[in-house]
Image (cartoon, rainbow, N blue to C red):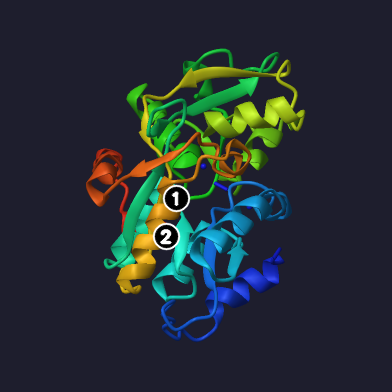
């Protein structure tokens, strides 16, 4: 879905900025697991502590939870073997795979029994954007450049309604999903796109006011966030990691991923994102990451 020891922005930068030295988990004393920085890093780390304890028990070795500064630095960390396992967003996985072909998606989260999720486009309830057509001439908030549900999918949705980014509306990239929701509520942007699950969670926690923000549109199903591992890990370790995720049933731990379980997945499940990027004429090699 965590899409949670806290790293500061500087520490996260240093993680991927240092010289790349391949690290093989079979020789390491701990396993480094990165969770997607789609919300506040401190909250992600705190919420992931039960998951960390579970994985340490399942694998019999220490686990280090990492949250990088952004999607791009997480992709680079995977590329240069600074992490062994990562919880990627669908598009950030596709970008990572293009730079590190040997990485392997092995499990995908289930949301209400389905290995898919949705994106929403939101606006102020009493603001100037009442319908999708009203986005024309306004400023739209996307999340990270490499985000699926907070960039690629809402951008494609707007394009299908005849609204081209940069031509028909201005846009800004705000980083995390929660930043998009807060910018809409605060009036910094007139509409924005983010994960439906994250938006619902923000409303439930009171982080944003559900009475002030309305959902204008909801996307078609998107293949859910994959768990990904380095392809050159020891085969026994790879099997143990996969089993740990597929056997995970604790609902409190699964909240870290906004999932109710995991099932196996493979690279072909994410071809739809590659196809969507082509429709938008987006060059994936030019997206940050």
Which of the labelled discs sits on residue 241, or is there none? 2
Identify which residue, 278 or 258, lies in the foreground.
258
Compared with 216, 244 (above or below) is: below
Estimate the x, y position of residue 136 in percent, counting from the top left.
Answer: 49, 24
Residue at (55, 71) in percent of width and height: 61
Label 1 element class? helix
Mark 1 neighbour density, 10 Å: few (under 14) some (14–19) many (20 or more)? many
Separation of residues labelled 2 and 1 (CA atoms): 7 Å
- Residue found at x 48% / y 50%: 145
Which of the two residues, 217 or 190, is positioned nearer the viewer here?
217
> Residue 285: percent from the left, percent from the top?
33, 60
Q: Residue at x 64, y 46 (%)?
A: 39
Q: Are marks 2 and 1 in contact (CB under 8 Å)?
A: yes
The number of callouts visible is: 2
Which quadrant: the C terminus? bottom left
Q: Which residue is mark 1?
A: 245
- The image shows residue 4 at horizontal and vertical percentages of 63, 52
| Residue 120 locus on image (x, y percent) | 51, 26
Disc number at residue 10? none
Reply above or below: 114 against 274.
Answer: above
Residue 75 appears in the figure: yes
- Is any part of residue 230 visible from this angle? no
């Amino acid at each position: 879905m965590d899409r949670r020891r806290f790293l500061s922005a500087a520490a996260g930068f240093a993680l991927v900025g240092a010289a790349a030295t391949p690290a093989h988990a079979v020789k390491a004393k701990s396993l480094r697991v990165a969770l997607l920085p789609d919300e506040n890093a401190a909250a992600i780390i705190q919420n992931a502590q039960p998951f960390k304890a579970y994985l340490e028990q399942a694998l019999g070795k220490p686990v280090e939870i990492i949250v990088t500064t952004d999607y791009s630095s997480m992709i680079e960390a995977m590329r240069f073997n600074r992490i062994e396992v990562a919880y990627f967003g669908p598009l950030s996985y596709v970008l990572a795979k293009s730079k590190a072909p040997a990485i392997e998606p092995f499990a995908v989260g289930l949301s209400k029994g389905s290995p898919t999720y949705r994106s929403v486009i939101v606006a102020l309830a009493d603001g100037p954007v009442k319908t999708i057509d009203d986005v024309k001439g306004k400023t739209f908030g996307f999340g990270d450049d490499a985000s699926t549900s907070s960039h690629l999918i809402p951008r494609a949705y707007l394009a299908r309604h005849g609204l081209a980014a940069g031509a028909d509306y201005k846009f800004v990239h705000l980083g995390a999903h929660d930043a998009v929701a807060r910018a809409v509520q605060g009036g910094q942007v007139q509409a924005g796109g983010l994960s439906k699950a994250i938006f619902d969670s923000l409303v439930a926690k009171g982080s944003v006011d559900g009475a002030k923000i309305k959902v204008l549109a909801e996307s078609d199903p998107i293949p859910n966030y994959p768990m990904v591992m380095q392809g050159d890990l020891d085969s026994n370790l790879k099997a143990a990691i996969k089993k740990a995720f597929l056997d995970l049933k604790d609902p409190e731990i699964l909240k870290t991923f906004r999932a109710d379980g995991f099932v196996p997945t493979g690279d072909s499940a994410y071809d739809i994102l590659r196809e969507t990027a082509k429709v938008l004429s987006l060059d994936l090699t030019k997206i940050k990451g």
